[in-house]
Image (tube, rainbow, N blue to C red):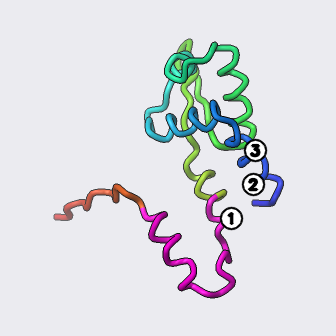
Amino acid sequence: MDDSEIIAALSALAQPTRLDTFRLLVTREPQGVPAGELARLIDVPQNTMSTHLAILSRAGLIRSERNSRSIIYRADLARFRDVTLHLVKDCCGGRPEMCAPLIAELTPCCPPAATAHG
């Protein structure tokens, strides 16, 4: 991932409606949300939402899939992970004790449930 891709992702999220949209899509993983419902939930006109979705899509933060007559949008969590990792890589200049609080904050709040084997 290069700096221009990071800048595009951060620029896409540096607008309130797009940030709200991305956050909403993260909460709706993995099922996604139809474009019209996104516009309704975020309370913006559909054509405005379409513009915001195009920007998030070009930045690689969301994916879309046609389902019959509607388009379902999903957050691209792998891409977001790559952006985050790129930003924090070598953030502490080889001093891991400096990164410990950051890593603790990035630890998922809801770890996956353990699966029973047997």
| Label ID, residue 11 | 3
| Residue 82, x across and y down, in percent | 64, 59
Question: On the image, numbered disc 1 is attached to which residue?
Answer: 86
Instruction: Measure the alpha-carbon separation of dots 3 and 1.
Output: 15 Å
81, 68: nearer the viewer: 81
Rendered view: 84 above or below 24: below
**Horizontal side of residue 51 vs 65, given as left or right:** right
| Residue 93, x across and y down, in percent | 69, 83
Residue 3 placement: quadrant: bottom right
45, 53: nearer the viewer: 45
Amino acid type at circle 3 is Ser
Amino acid type at circle 2 is Ile
Question: On the image, numbered disc 2 is attached to which residue?
Answer: 6
Q: Which residues are magenta?
A: 84-107
Instruction: Measure the alpha-carbon separation of dots 2 and 3.
Output: 8 Å
Q: Secondary structure at mark 2?
A: helix
Residue at 62%, 36% in the rendered image? 63
112, 102: nearer the viewer: 102
Quick one: quadrant of the C terminus? bottom left
Amino acid type at circle 1 is His
Are the residues tagged 1 and 2 within 8 Å (C-beta)? yes
